[in-house]
Image: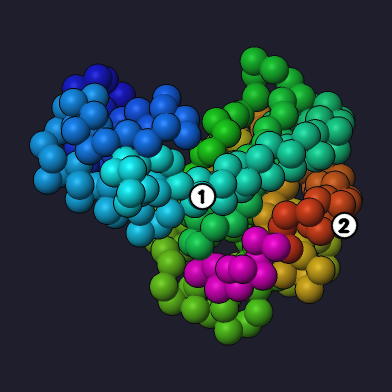
Amino acid sequence: MTESTGKKYRVPAVEQAIHLMLFLAEGGSTPRSLTEICQAVGIHRSKAFSILSTLAEHNLVKKYPNRKGYVLGPGLLTLTGKMLETFRLSRLVEPVLDELAKKAGATVALGIISDDRTYVIAQFEGAPGIGISSPIGYVMPITYGAHGKAIAAFLPEDELEDMLKTQKPYFYGRPEKFDRAKFTKELIQCRRNMYALELGDIQKGVNAVASPVLDQNNYPVGYISIVGFFSREMARKLGPMAAEAAKLLSKEAGHFIFWQRANSRRNII
């Protein structure tokens, strides 16, 4: 993305809110007046007041009525806590995923579910420089490829049907390639084997294996995937390895963060 293209998608009000909060962060516990904020951020008083009022509604900014100033609000602690949970989770699962990546000689990723998308929060390369990789934070549809099948296989029937009605099916790449009979057969196999396969349907020569990470109620809240240039035969050999790693993470990491996230977002679609 070029600089000009990047600017095209910027939202001025959001940028102003970010600059405003960074300015308050520099002040620490010292309240900043509306005049100081306007001068520092370079916006009019009415615009600054509107942004501050909106942030205050979400507890991201706090106003001292007597001292006529603003400081950062306690709502940021919630966001910070979630971020730290993710970092801690990455450290918790690192030995499992790193070992799996080395054994597979391919890229292993851990993703979590949020609404109708999945987010990569950890990744390990078993063959650095020649594997398939996605940056941390990479977003994909919940219906995408092998991990989409692994998630779908463990959804309650009503939620699965709702997903298929409301979400575009990217299980085989383009939605028009979706085959309900083939898909149903693969879900049955996934429930039996605890892993799903994607064999070159999305990109020729690239295969993937995915296993769901489940909470204490066997509800999907994340996934482990192995992606690389390995053969179809190797994919089937890697399947049980992915399933074993996901089983371990479901037990260890699930009680730390996954089940909390799932219970707070029971409807993921």
Q: Establish if 157 lies above or below 257.
A: below
* SS type, badge 1: loop
Q: Give x and y (percent) for residue 29.
A: 47, 34
Residue 175 is tagged as: none
* Label 2 to label 1: alpha-carbon separation: 32 Å
Residue pictured at 26% horizontal, 20% vertical = 2
Q: Establish if 29 lies above or below 51.
A: above
Q: Residue furthest bottom?
A: 158
- Residue at mark 2: 251
Q: Give x and y (percent) for residue 173.
A: 48, 51
For residue 26, say whether it is visible.
yes
Q: Give x and y (percent) for residue 9.
A: 23, 36
Residue pictured at 87% horizontal, 52% vertical = 252
Q: Quadrant of residue 167?
A: bottom left
Specify whether 206 is left or right of 105: left
Specify whether 265 is left or right of 101: left
Specify whether 202 is left or right of 126: left
Task: Look at label 1 and name its amino acid.
Answer: Pro
Judged by depth in the image, the label closer to the viewer, 2 or 1, is 1
Residue pictured at 31% horizontal, 30% vertical = 19
- Residue at mark 1: 74
Task: Look at label 2 and name its amino acid.
Answer: Lys
Neighbour class for label 2 at 10 Å: few (<14), some, many (≥20)? some
Residue nearer the viewer, 135 or 233 = 135
* SS type, badge 2: helix
Q: In the image, which residues are magenta?
A: 260-269
Neighbour class for label 1 at 10 Å: few (<14), some, many (≥20)? some
Q: Establish if 192 lies above or below 74.
A: below
Specify whether 180 is left or right of 99: left
Asked if the stretch drawn in magenta spans residue 261, the answer is yes
